[in-house]
Amino acid sequence: MAPHVAFEFARFQFASTPEMFLQAGEHGGLIREAFLIHFRNLLDFFYGKKSQKGDVLASDYKEASSIWAPNVPSWLDQYRRRCNKLLAHLTYDRVDYADSNDMIWDLENKIQHIRDEWKSFMGALPDEKRAWFTL
């Protein structure tokens, strides 16, 4: 699974670059939606709990002797919920977000947080496991 996880991070990185993320029009909208899907997947990878037998978590790769632990952000629950309600599922909550003019995503610090988490996670892996996370 490690190459699939690396794919998620690579797409997250690509879609979050200013030249991609800030594109105008429908194309830009599609890129931002793709970004949010990969963002949501990485939130679940780093901070999720095994709710299904096949769920893949960062903790699956952690060595018993490793001191690495995810740096759980204070905004996690709010942004996971936003991704679920506004992107991953068709819900009536979309109307509530739109009616309250709450459709703006404040992502700059969230992007950096996920980049830092990836770096910390990869740095904690032994070389053998780190090599698994290549495309």
Image (spheres, rainbow, N blue to C red):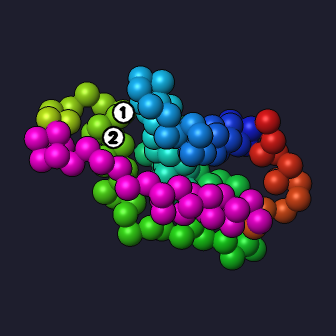
Residue appearing at x 78%, y 45% in the figure: 133
Please, what secondary structure does the residue beneath circle 2 have? helix
Picture coordinates of residue 130 (x, y %)?
82, 54
Q: In this view of the protein, can residue 5 be seen by the observer?
A: no
SS label for mark 1: helix
Q: Residue furthest front?
A: 24
Q: Residues within 10 Å of mark 2 (few under 14, many from 20)?
A: some
Residue 96, quarter of the rendered image: top left
Residue 130 left/right relative to 73: right
Instruction: Judge left or right: residue 76 versus residue 126.
Output: left
- 46 relative to 92, above or below: below
Magenta residues, as a range?
96-123
| Quadrant containing the N terminus in the rendered view | top right
Residue type, mark 1 in image:
Ala
Along the line of sight, the residue nearer the viewer: 93 or 4: 93
Residue ID for mark 2: 84
Q: Where is residue 105 drawn, in percent x and y?
A: 35, 50
Looking at this view, name the residue that lies furthest to the top: 26
State the image quarter where residue 135 is shown: top right
User: Marks 1 and 2: in contact by CB < 8 Å?
Assistant: yes
Residue located 44% across and 54% down the image: 107
Q: Amino acid at mark 2?
A: Asn
Q: Dot 1: within a 10 Å radius of its alpha carbon, few (fewer than 14), some, or many (20 or more) residues? A: some
Secondary structure mostly taken by the magenta-highlighted segment of the chain: helix
Viewer-nearest residue: 14 or 116: 14
Q: Residue at x 75, y 74 (%)?
A: 65
- In the rendering, which numbered label is found on residue 88? 1
Residue 108, image x, y percentages: 48, 58
